[in-house]
Image (cartoon, rainbow, N blue to C red):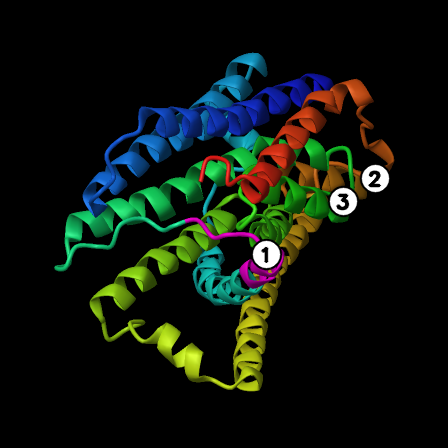
């Protein structure tokens, strides 16, 4: 079954990588009008709706369901979409801290690229003079909500579930940092998205759920949209963020980012504590229910998700053939990422 799962997740990843390239070609050659912000948003909507809903969500879901011979419920379980725990909401303040850390990492990475001669592509047209609520909602939908659901389903769903049954958690975190960084196929995004991908993989592995990563992803992207509008329209909350950061001494800015990082780390620690506390209560109840029959208790723990669904001595080691397509897709993503640096391909 696991050998079949490797084929399934390879096909799903192919849908993501090749679908992204396909849609960029469509938008590029369609040459849709983008002189105004509304027209530019319309072009982005065509790209995002098709890419996210079809290639990142619908196609992988259908592959996992039909090729994997799963029911809808089993498909969602395979992709770590299950019950929601209240402590997952701590991923919201974590997402805010991640956004501010992303500003620092992204700015530093872009400055480094400029030193090598890289030219930053021109941005989209200026926003309208007056705030348009419909544009704001569309931006939140396209930039925050869809990626949080679809990209997490594609990257930290069935793909992570399958790879984790073959390799250690540490290996998975590093691997998914590389995959998520290259997945964007954009030299400006590759570094901070790799770090984001590592954190999202860690949260998914430790909580065995997609919801924390989804909430963190949504909050991070929502902050990006909100701050852009706040700066453009001079909103009291967030409107002067970049001005304040611009006048801060470097050492003060470094201390601020350190404090933000420690706050984010505290959110992760609290989440893990609450998860472990719930599991301890479940384990105590199982010990009583099964009269301290440890074999029965361990089986119940695996079934209920208290402990990992596999042990290191039973890891399936995929062959080169099992991972050949995944390696090929990462090579393609690496090449298109390099193209965005050398030629500004698609940008």
Q: Secondary structure at mark 2?
A: helix
Q: Give how far across and how far down residue 202 sits, in percent.
A: 64, 51
Residue drawn at x 44%, y 64% as measured from the top left: 96
- Residue 5 seen in the current view: yes
Q: Nearer the viewer, mark 3 or mark 1?
A: 1
Residue lying at the far front of the rendered structure: 117
Q: Nearer the viewer, residue 203 or 271?
A: 203
Q: Secondary structure at mark 1?
A: helix
Q: Is residue 36 above or below residue 72?
A: below
Q: Is residue 32 above or below residue 238?
A: above
Q: Nearer the viewer, residue 177 or 112?
A: 112
Mark 2, residue position: 312
Counting residues from the N terminus, which is met first, the one under dot 3 or under dot 1? 1
Q: Residues within 10 Å of mark 1 (few under 14, many from 20)?
A: some
Q: Secondary structure at mark 3?
A: helix
Q: Nearer the viewer, mark 3 or mark 2?
A: 3
Residue drawn at x 58%, y 85% as measured from the top left: 251
Look at the image and give the residue range highlighted in magenta: 109-121
Q: Give how far across and how far down residue 68 sits, in percent.
A: 59, 16
Q: Residues within 10 Å of mark 2 (few under 14, many from 20)?
A: few
Mark 1, residue position: 113
Q: Give how far across and how far down residue 177 sits, in percent.
A: 65, 47
Q: Is residue 31 above or below residue 1?
A: below
Mark 3, residue position: 171
């Amino acid at each position: 079954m696991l050998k079949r799962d490797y084929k399934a997740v390879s096909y799903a990843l192919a849908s993501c990588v090749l679908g992204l390239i396909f849609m960029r070609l469509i938008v590029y050659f369609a040459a849709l009008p983008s002189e105004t912000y509304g027209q530019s948003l319309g072009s982005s909507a065509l790209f995002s709706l098709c890419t996210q809903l079809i290639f990142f969500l619908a196609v992988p879901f259908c592959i996992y369901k039909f090729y994997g011979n799963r029911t809808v419920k089993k498909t969602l379980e395979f992709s770590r979409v299950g019950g929601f725990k209240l402590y997952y909401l701590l991923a919201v303040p974590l997402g805010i801290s991640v956004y501010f850390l992303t500003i620092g990492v992204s700015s530093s990475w872009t400055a480094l690229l400029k030193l090598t001669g890289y030219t930053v592509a021109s941005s989209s047209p200026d926003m309208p003079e007056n705030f348009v609520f419909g544009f704001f909602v569309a931006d939140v939908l396209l930039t925050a909500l869809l990626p949080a659901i679809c990209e997490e389903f594609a990257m930290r769903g069935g793909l992570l579930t399958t790879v984790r049954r073959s390799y250690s958690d540490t290996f998975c975190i590093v691997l998914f940092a590389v995959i998520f960084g290259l997945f964007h196929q954009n030299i400006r995004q590759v570094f901070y998205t790799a770090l984001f991908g590592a954190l999202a993989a860690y949260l998914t592995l430790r909580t065995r759920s997609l919801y924390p990563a989804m909430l963190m992803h949504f909050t991070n992207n929502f902050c990006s949209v909100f701050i852009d509008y706040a700066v453009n329209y001079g909103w009291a909350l967030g409107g002067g963020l970049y001005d304040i950061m611009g006048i801060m001494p470097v050492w003060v800015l470094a201390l601020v980012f350190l404090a933000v990082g420690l706050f984010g780390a505290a959110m992760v620690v609290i989440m893990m504590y609450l998860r472990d506390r719930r599991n301890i209560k479940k384990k105590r109840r199982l010990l009583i229910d099964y009269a301290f029959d440890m074999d029965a208790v361990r089986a119940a723990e695996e079934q209920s998700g208290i402990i990992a669904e596999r042990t290191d001595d039973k890891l399936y080691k995929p062959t080169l053939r099992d991972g050949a397509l995944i390696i090929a897709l990462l090579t393609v993503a690496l090449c298109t990422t390099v193209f965005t640096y050398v030629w500004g391909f698609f940008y």
